[in-house]
Amino acid sequence: LVRLRARLARSQSSLGRGLLSLLGGGDLTEDDWEELEDTLLAADVGVEPTRELVDNLRNRLRVEGVSDPARAREILREELIGVVGPSLDRSLKSTGDDGKPGVVLVVGVNGTGKTTTVGRLARVLVAEDKTVLLGAADTFRAAAADQLQTWGERVGVPTVRGPEGGDPASVGFDAVKQGIADGTDVVLVDTAGRLHTKAGLMDELGKVKRVIEKQAPVTEVLLVIDATTGQNGLTQARVFSEVVDVTGIVLTKLDGTAKGGIVIAVQRALGAPVKFVGLGEGADDLAPFDAEEFVDALLA
Ligand code: GDP
C-alpha cells in the first residue's frame, strides 16, 4: 500500500504543488485565484466542482482571516476531501442472496483495462478467502477470453467461456449457472466494450444483465474508465451509464496521468463512487479508493 501511495503521489504531485505554491504566498490576488482555477481545470476536476471548491476555499479563507499557509493548506485539504466524497460507500457489492453468488458485471470501452481489472479483482477476492469464477462474456475477440483465462489460471479460479463470436449473454448465463452449481461466492463477468453504435451496445449489455438476472441478481455494475482519456472518457462513461445502472467506477491508469481530478468529475457525471483505482500494469496494482488517502497523495 505504501508503494501504491508513493506511485499515486508521483502521478498527482504537479496538481498538489501548483495548489500549495499558490496558497503559500500569503494574500491571494485575483490572478492567483484564476491560476488556482486553471490548475484544477487542467487536472480534469471539471468546471462545476472547480467553481465550488474555489468559492468555498475563498469564503473560508476570508471568514477565518487566514494568512498562515499551514492553515490554508489544511482548509484546502478539507475542501478537497469534501468534493471527493468522504462518506460515499465504496465497498464492492459481491455478496449474493439466498446462498447464490454475488454477480459483478465489469463494463467499459475496450482498452480501458476491463480484463485486467477482472483479474485483479479476482486476486483481491481470493485473498479474502472467497471463491471466484470468471465469465468471459467478451466473445468478440478470442484474445479477450484467452487473456481472461490466463488471469484465471494465475489466480487459480475457473473461467467460463463460449465460442468466439458467440452470444455474450449466454456466456454470462452459463457462468452464473456454474457459479450457482459450484456454490461460488462471486462471479465476475467481463464484457465487450465496442462503442460502434450506442443501440448495439445497449442491446448487448442490457441483454447480458437481463439474462444473468434470470438466475441471480447482478450485485454490482463496475464501469472501468481510463484516467488518461480525460473528458473523452467521461463522454463514454455517460453512454454506458445510460445503458446499465452503474453502481461503481474503476479508474485505471491513474499512474500515467497528472489529471487525478478526473476522480471528482467522473463521480459527479455518473452519480456513482470511484471504488478502485489502477496504479500500474501489475497484478497488485489495483487499490481500493479512499478519499482522504487520495487527497493526501494529491497534496504530498
Ligand atoms: P480491456 O480491453 O478493457 O479488457 O483492457 P485490458 O485489461 O486488456 O488492458 C489494456 C491495457 O491497459 C493493458 O496493457 C493493461 O496492462 C493496461 N492497464 C490496465 N490497467 C492499468 C493501470 O492501472 N495502469 C497502467 N499503466 N496500465 C494499465
Image (tube, rainbow, N blue to C red):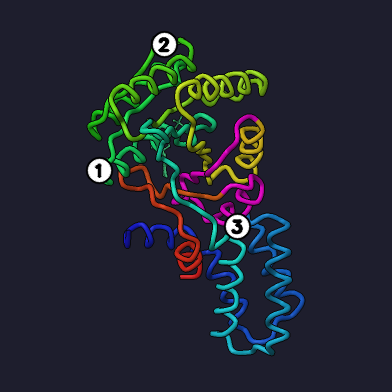
- Using the numbered discs, state the Cα–Cα distance from disc 3 to disc 1 in whole angstroms: 38 Å
Q: Are marks 1 and 2 in contact (CB under 8 Å)?
A: no
**Region of the chain picked out in magenta, as a range:** 243-272
Residue 236: image quadrant is top right
Mark 3 vs mark 2, foreground winner is 2
Instruction: Point out which mark residue 81 bears.
Output: none
Q: Is residue 261 above or below residue 176?
A: below
Q: Is 254 contained in the magenta span? A: yes
Q: Residue furthest right?
A: 30
The disc, 1 or 2, on the residue closer to the chain's N-terminal end is: 1
- Using the numbered discs, state the Cα–Cα distance from disc 1 to disc 2 in whole angstroms: 32 Å
Q: Residue at x 52, y 44 (%)?
A: 249
The disc, 3 or 2, on the residue closer to the chain's N-terminal end is: 3
Secondary-structure class at tag 3: loop
Q: Is residue 87 above or below residue 56?
A: above
Q: Amino acid at mark 2?
A: Glu
Q: Amino acid at mark 3?
A: Ala
- x and y percentages locating residue 37 in the rendered image: 69, 65
Q: How many marks?
A: 3
* Viewer-side residue, 270 vs 225: 270
The disc, 3 or 1, on the residue closer to the chain's N-terminal end is: 3
- Does the residue tagged 1 have its C-beta within 8 Å of any atom of ligand 1? no
Instruction: Point out which mark residue 43 bears.
Output: 3
Instruction: Point out which mark residue 164 bears.
Output: 2
- x and y percentages locating residue 13 in the rendered image: 49, 64
Residue 176: image quadrant is top left
Q: Residue at x 62, y 84 (%)?
A: 25
Mark 1 vs mark 2, foreground winner is 1
Residue annotated with mark 1: 129
Would you call the spot at circle 2 few (<14 residues within 10 Å), some (14-19), or many (20 or more)?
A: some
